[in-house]
Image: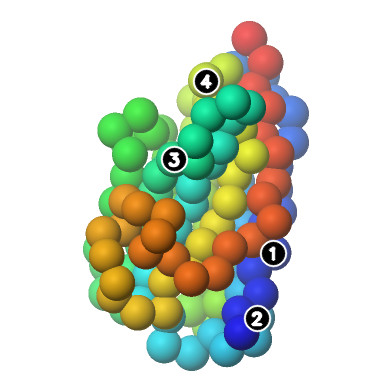
Amino acid sequence: QVQLVESGGGLVQAGGSLRLSCAASGRTFNFYRMGWFRQAPGKEREFVSAIRWGGTSTYYADSVKGRFTISRDNANNTVYLQMNTLKPEDTAVYYCAVAQYLRGSYYYTSSYEYWGQGTQVTVSS
């Protein structure tokens, strides 16, 4: 089992920044990929960004490319999401997720086995 705990969410004005963290515990060896998704009220959970646990591959949704940066700290089993130039449409609950094996595209929620409880990000206009 893997436990994921997100932190760093909050209320920020448009144009501001936040840094989300996701700390993993439990069976943390041999992750394949970690990702961030978000879900706004009344909408489906959508892909935001993902990073391979080994190597340098990173992936971003078009809506956040150039504004968000994903990074990881393997030694501390933590993944980060630096969010800059935030917009009201970025308001959502942000979830981190772990894929222990390659089982599909980074883009799909079904490709990840474990999920955190989420952290709320609210961007005011």
The answer to the question of whether label 1 and label 2 lie on touching residues, with beta carbons closer than 8 A, is yes
Across and down, in percent, residue 59 comes to: 29, 51
The residue under label 3 is: 46
Q: Nearer the viewer, residue 53 or 109?
A: 109
Label 2 environment density (alpha carbons within 10 Å; few <14, some 14–19, many ≥20): some
For marks 4 and 1, give the CA distance.
24 Å
- Mark 1 sits on what residue? 5
Give above or below for 5 relative to 28.
above
**Position of the N terminus by quadrant:** bottom right
Q: Are marks 4 and 1 in contact (CB under 8 Å)?
A: no
Q: Looking at the image, can residue 102 be seen?
A: yes
Q: Residue at x 57, y 89 (%)?
A: 27
Q: Classify mark 2: helix, strand or loop.
A: strand
Residue behind mark 2: 25
Sooner in the amino-acid sequence: mark 1 or mark 2: 1
Taking the spot 48% from the left edge, 52% from the top edge, the residue there is 36
Give the mark nearer the N terminus: 2 vs 4. Answer: 2
**Residue visible at 54% across and 85% down?**
28
Mark 2 vs mark 4, CA separation in Å: 31 Å
Q: Nearer the viewer, residue 43 or 17?
A: 43
Whichever of labels 4 and 3 marks the residue nearer the N terminus, that label is 3
Expressed as whole percent of the image width and height from the top left, the position of residue 75 reads 53, 83
The residue type indicated by label 2 comes to Ser
Label 4–label 3 contact, CB within 8 A: no
Res. 16 visible in picture: no
Residue at left 69%, top 46%? 119
